[in-house]
Image (spheres, coloured by chain):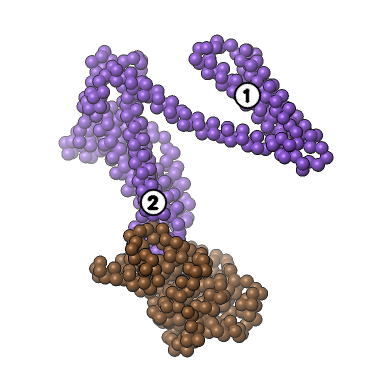
Chain colours: A brown, B purple
Amino acid sequence: MYDTTRSEADVSQQDIKISARNVQVYYGDKHAIKDVNVEILDKTVTAFIGPSGCGKSTFLRCINRMNDTIDIARIEGEIRLDGEDVYDRRVDPVQLRAKVGMVFQKPNPFPKSIYDNVAYGPRIHGLARNKADLDGIVEKALRGAALWNEVKDRLQEPGTGLSGGQQQRLCIARAVATAPEVLLMDEPCSALDPIATGQVEELIDQLREQFSVVIVTHSMQQAARVSQKTAFFHLGNLVEYGDTNDIFTKPRDSRTEAYISGRIG
Amino acid sequence: MPMSWALLVTLLLAGAGYLVGRSRAFSSAGADIRLMHSRPTYHGASVALLTVAPALVVLLLAAVLRMSGLLAADTAATGIAVLIAAVIGLGYGISRINAAFQARNAVERMVLTFLILCSMIAIATTAGIVLSLIFETGSFFQKYSWHEFFFGTEWTPRFDGNSQLGMLPLLWGTLYISFIALLVAVPIGLMAAIYLSEYASPRVRSIAKPLVELLAGIPTIVYGLFALITVGPLLRDAIAQPLGLGNSASSVLTAGLVMGIMLIPFVSSLSDDIINAVPQSLRDGALGLGSTPSEIVRQVVMPAALPGIVGAVLLAASRAIGETMIVVLGAGAAATMSLNPLEAMTTITVKIVSQLTGDNDFSSPETLVAFALGLTLFVITLGLNIVALIIVRKYREQYE
């Protein structure tokens, strides 16, 4: 299911999608992210791991400027998406977030029908020319999220009526339908049971053929299963970043080794 | 012996019962206090409650008997009866105490009974009010034909008899004024709530929200004064006279506008709470898909908050329908039926007040009509609330 040997060869040839330089994040007086430098590749799954409060989610939310909504958050340094600084004054966070989609820890379908949930992004961004076009986008996104067969006969039923795992796949379909270039996933499986987790992981593996996926996870097994690149965060520092295989088999930093062997975190 | 003394002694007995019960519980426990089922304070409390409860029952019974005329107003005898009941309860309570007695469960049962009684009072009172309305309305319809009341378009009560008591002009005035009030209050209140909950910075919000809620506490008579001395003359001079629509300072528009202003804080405060109850995760989800703040409000927050907002609007409507003071001072007391919003009209509530003030003869239809009007008002607001409930439930099924 997760062919990590295949991936290593592909990854080295991928272009850099996101590059972060000297990123600092402060929450009020708290220095939450300390001088993070990282390059995230296109068409690759990158996992952020680390103990709770290490800053991995905070850093993820910097990439699509979700931290803008938090008044006390202050961000320094630069994050470039395809060479353009996302914190540049000319960048509209609304457009940025259309390119950098996000899936959250808790499934959060809108109080609308399944169809309208998936059609939400295409509608607000004008991606469909007509109804048939929109139908096509919705079907493709739902198929992409491995949800089509389960919901095709009840597209007009509320999205909130689905099971937890289905809801999370609906949220992924909703993000995919917007045709993002990067998909950020903040612990997407933490509210799911093992079977639903397996389905979502399989889905993530397919999604990287289309775009870059960055996933924050508490589960090291999950990071090892789905990602090709792994970044280990600890106390706001990016301790180690490299090929997933290397991180889990021959970590360079003693803190990484302590974390993956279960001694800290 | 005055009743207050009897009650005081009962309370003293209860206090003594508590102490005695507790100490008896301690002594009955023997060496190992953990062998007891309940803690000693529960034993004490059970004795105290058993002292007070029978005394109160006797007191209540005496009151009922006195009201129905079966008992003369003999307070001394009642006081003694109360005391006897208290002493019997006290004795029974103390006799029950031993280590195995489940005092905690007994106390909790008694407290539960008390709570149920309290909630029954609200329901029973409402039922009583409705019943009295129905009886008085019944005697009104024996003296005045019901179809003339419901379908009559003429309201000219005369205390020498021969009155025209048609309800339609009053109903029309009520609905017209309420409609204008809601037309003012709902859009403004809703927009204010959207600004406060979705756009305002925490600092603005922390100042503006309490301020708006403060406005909701202004007595309606003050709004009425505002209608009488400011809004009414202003509308007359600025609109009514230049357009030749009337000469009256009191008008439907005046009352409606001022009532709408009164309802703005009510609507905005309720809607704000409802909008805030929409989970932040939904907003984050929409934000993460590249929505603008206004798209989030229109497409995610509003649909989720709609059932609650409909409820808030209907609550505001029942307040508008029941409002009296602003109408008296703003719209006048003339029972007319007209489409002209600058004409003086009046409402059901105003007429209820005017029919019941002054010397009343509770057998004449001119007085009894107030109860028929009251019942009509009650049925209208009840219907409104039922509709609100149905709408809320329907949307909830769709969204959750």
Q: Residue at x 35, y 58 (%)?
A: A157
The chain carrying label 1 is B
Q: Position of residue A210 (x, y in %)?
A: 39, 79
Q: Position of residue B239 (x, y in %)?
A: 21, 39
Q: Residues within 10 Å of mark 2 (few under 14, many from 20)?
A: few
Please give left or right for residue B243 compared with residue B346 in the image.
Answer: left
Indicate which disc residue B390 carries: none
Q: Residue at x 70, y 28 (%)?
A: B93
Frontmost residue, B144 versus B266 = B144
Position of residue B150 relative to residue B196, above or below, is above
Marks 1 and 2 close (CB-CB < 8 Å):
no
| Residue positioned most to the left | B244
- The residue that label 1 is drawn on is B54
Identified by mark 2, the residue type is Glu
Frontmost residue, B34 versus A32 = B34
Work out how far the residue at label 1 is from the one at label 2, CA to CA, in angstroms. 48 Å
Position of residue B13 relative to residue B388, above or below, is above
Q: Residue at x 56, y 71 (%)?
A: A218
Tell me the SS state at disc 2: helix
Q: Looking at the image, tell me whether mark 1 or mark 2 is earlier in sequence order.
A: 1
Frontmost residue, B378 versus B43 = B43
Please give left or right for residue B386 compared with residue B114 in the image.
Answer: left
Q: Position of residue B372 (x, y in %)?
A: 32, 24
**Quadrant in the picture for the C terminus of chain A:** bottom right
Indicate which disc residue B397 carries: 2
Frontmost residue, B231 versus B286 = B286
The chain carrying label 2 is B
Q: Residues within 10 Å of mark 1 (few under 14, many from 20)?
A: many
Identified by mark 1, the residue type is Pro
Q: Residue at x 66, y 22 (%)?
A: B86
